[in-house]
Amino acid sequence: MASADRSAWIPIPAGFPAGKPGGLTVQTRARPGIICILGLLIIISAAGANGDIPPLPHLFYGNVTILGDPAQAGLPVTAVVRAGATEVGGGAITSSAGTYGGPGPQDQKLIASLDDPDAVGPFTVSFFVMGMPADCREHGTGTWLETFPFSSGMVTNLDLNVSEIVLMADFSASETLGVAPLNVQFTDRSIGPRSSWEWSFGDGGTSNQQNPVHQYGSPGTYTVSLTVRDPATSVSDTETKPGYITVTELPPPPVAAFTANVTSGDAPLVVRFTDLSTGSPFEWGWSFGDGGTSAVQNPVHTYSIPGVYTVSLSVRGISGIDSETKPGYITVRTPVPTANFTANRTEGVAPFAVAFTDLSTGYPQQWTWNFGDGETSVAQNPVHTYHSAGIFTVILTVENSAGTDSLERRDYINVTSSLLPRASFTAVPVSGYEPLTVRFTDTSTGDPVAWNWSFGDGTYSEEQNPNHTYVMGVYSITFTATNDKGSDSITKNKYITVSHRAAGGGGGGGGGGGGGVFFIGGTPNATATPTPSPTPIPPGGLVLGPDNTTIQEATIVSPDGMTSLVIGIGVRPVGPDGLPLTQVSVFPLAGDAVPGGAPCIAVVHAYAVLPSGSTFDPAVRLVITFTPDQWREIENDRPVIIFHDSDTGTWTEIATTADAEAGSLTGLISRGGTYAVCRRAPLTTIPPTGPTPVPTTPAPGGLPFQVVIPVIVLLVVALGALAYFISTRMWKRGPPPEEGS
C-alpha cells in the first residue's frame, strides 16, 4: 500500500505478534463481571445526567473474517466513534479464536466509547481489522454496513468482514542477537497479495527470496528492510526495522584458574574455593582429591580425613574448555585429640558392671583407662566391673601422632554394698486420664523382703508390685524396701499426673494415656514390662574413613542404660538423604508413641534408632538388657525383637538371640526406626477386669480387712445354723407339760 493510503489507518500497537491461520489469539485479559460494572455505570450515569460524566461505552463481540475466511490469529480489531466526520472517541481490543470476544459476562468485548462528554450526536462506529476498514452486520442478518449506530450502554453481537486487502509489509527473524558468524532465518509476515520480495540486510547483502537465510560475518548492529509488491496493481510497501540485528565477537577461549582461602589446617578443614577463570566460562567442574566433586562456581568443601589432596578445576565456555590442576594443594593435619567419654550407668550395687563409651575427637589412635579401683584398660570402649563399694574417679587418656589429652571425671562411679537394699521402682503409665490405673514395679536391689508404698493420695500398700487407681491430680510416690539388714526409701515427686478427659474424648490404644506399655490383640488387662518415658540424649558420633565406612567401633547407649546399639568397624552407615551418616542416637518411646498392629500379646520396651530411614551395611547389633525381675517376667513368653516398617505400617520379627544368663536380647538390624520387644506367649497372670480396688491399710496389730470380712460372714452363718438347730429340737419335743397335770 502506498504511504498516502497508510495515513488513513488506525495505528497498530507496537510489537503486536504475528499470528497463525485458523483463529485469533487473545492478547489482553477481560475484566470479570463486565455486565455488573455496566449496570453500576448506568446508575452513576443517571445520577449525573446533568454533569460531565461521559456516556457509557457500546460493547461489541462477534466473528471476524477477511475476504470471507476466518481472520488470521493475533490481528487487532479497532472501533472508532465519530459524530458525523469527526472522531470523538474509540477503543481497541484483540480477539480470540476467530472472533473478537464472546457473549458471556466474563468474555472480552470490543469497547467503543465517547471520550468527549460534550460531543453532539448522532454517533456512528467504524471498525478496522489490522488497520484495514471492515464492514459490519448484526449477527444473523444479511446486510453489511460500513458503520454501526453508537448506543450508550448496549452490547451488540456484530460480525466484521474485510472485503478489500491492502498490501502491508512485515517480517520477523529467528535470531536478533548472537555471536559472529550469525545465521538468521528471516520470515515474511506481510499481508495482502504480493509476488516479489526485496530484502536489504544492512551489511550490503540482499535477497529476493520470500523467507531467506542470511549470515552476518562481522560484529555490528544492522538495519533490515523488506519491500513487497502487488503484481496486479504494482503497489508496493516497505517495512524497515532499524538496529534489528546485533552481532558480537566470539569471546576468547576460557582459561581455568582458582584459589583457596586456606590450604592447610587440622581436620576437619573447611576450605572455600574461588574461581579465577577468564573467558566467560558457564560450566565448572571441581575435583577435591578426596572423592568429593562440585559443579558450583565457588564451592565450600570440608576435608574430614587428614591427608594431602590434589585439586583440579575444569571450565567450559563458548569458545572451548580448559583445566587447571594443583598437586598437593590442600594439606589436612591430624589434630591433637580431645578426650571425652560417658558411661551407661554411674550408680549401682557391687558387683557393678559399667560400659564406658569413648566420645573423644581428633582421631585418637590409643586409649588408656584408669577406673579408680586400681584397674586399667587399653580398649576403646571397655566394660568394667566394680567388685567393692566406693566412689571412684575415672580418667581417660587418648593419644595420636599429634599429641595426647586426658579427661578426669571425679567421683564418677558410686558403688554401694549389697548388704542393704537400694529402693527403686518404675510405674506404667505415669500420666493419663482419670480413672488411671497404674502398675508399680519394684526394681530394688539387695533382695528386699518387705515393701511399703505411699501413693500420694492417702492410701498405702504392702504388695511388692501393686496396682493403684488414681483420680485427677498430681501425686508424689514414696517407696520403702526392707530386708534383714535394714531399709531404704525413694521419693519421686510429682511422678503421677492424672487429667480429666474432656467431653467427647476418645480412648487410647494402650490404656491410661502416656504409659510405656502398648497392648495388642484384645488383651488390655494383660501385664507387661514398663517402658521408660522418652528422654532425648545427644547423638552418638561415628568416625568414617575415606570409603565412608566406620574405622572405630562405637556403642550408642539409650538414656535409661537399657539398650545399646553396637556399630563395629567396617560398617557403612547411610542417612535417609543418601549421604554418609556420622550421628546416631537411641532413646526409649512411651506407649502412646508406639505404633499398633504388632502380632503380640504385648509390645514392651520400645526404642527409636535415629535417624529413622538410615541404613547400616553390614547389620549392627541392638542389645536390650533387662533387670532380673524384668527378665523373669518375660523369659517364658518367647520374647523377640520386632521392627516397625513405617512405609507399610507393619511389624516384622528380626533374628533375635536370647541370653538368659545376662538377661538380654540381641538382634541384628540394618535400618533406623522403631524397635520393640514382642511377648509372643500367653501371659501368666491376667488381672481381673474393671478398676483395680484400692488396698486398705490394716490397723497396727490387727487382721487385714480382707480377712476380717470372711471371718464375720462365717460367724453369722454359724450362729444362724445353731439357732436353726435349737429351734428344731424344741419343736420336736412339743410344748412343756402344764403344772399339775
Image (tube, helix red, strand yellow):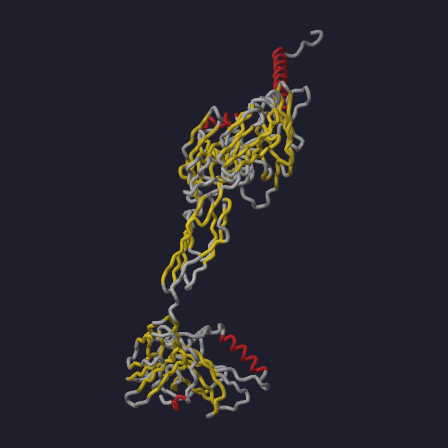
- Which residue corresponds to the image point at 50% horizontal and 90% vertical from the top-left? 121
Residue 326 appears in the figure: yes
Residue nearer the viewer, 710 or 385? 385
| 418, above or below 647, in the image | above
Task: Please give left or right for residue 121 compared with residue 389 in the image.
Answer: left
| 350, above or below 437, in the image | above
Residue 296 locus on image (x, y percent) = 44, 56
Residue 509 appears in the figure: no
| Image quadrant assignment for residue 478 | top right
| 480, above or below 723, in the image | below
| Image quadrant assignment for residue 484 | top right
Residue 81 locus on image (x, y percent) = 47, 87
Q: Quadrant of the N terminus?
A: bottom left
Task: Please give left or right for residue 284 compared with residue 205 in the image.
Answer: right
- Which residue corresponds to the image point at 62% horizontal and 10% vertical from the top-left? 733
Task: Please give left or right for residue 522 compared with residue 422 in the image.
Answer: left
Residue nearer the viewer, 472 or 309? 309
Residue farthest toward the right in the current orientation of the protein: 740
Residue 314 locus on image (x, y percent) = 39, 56
Residue nearer the viewer, 172 or 635? 172
Q: Quadrant of the C terminus?
A: top right
Q: How many marks?
A: 0
Residue 297 locus on image (x, y percent) = 45, 58
Residue farthest toward the top in the current orientation of the protein: 740
- Which residue corresponds to the image point at 33% horizontal and 77% vertical from the top-left? 187
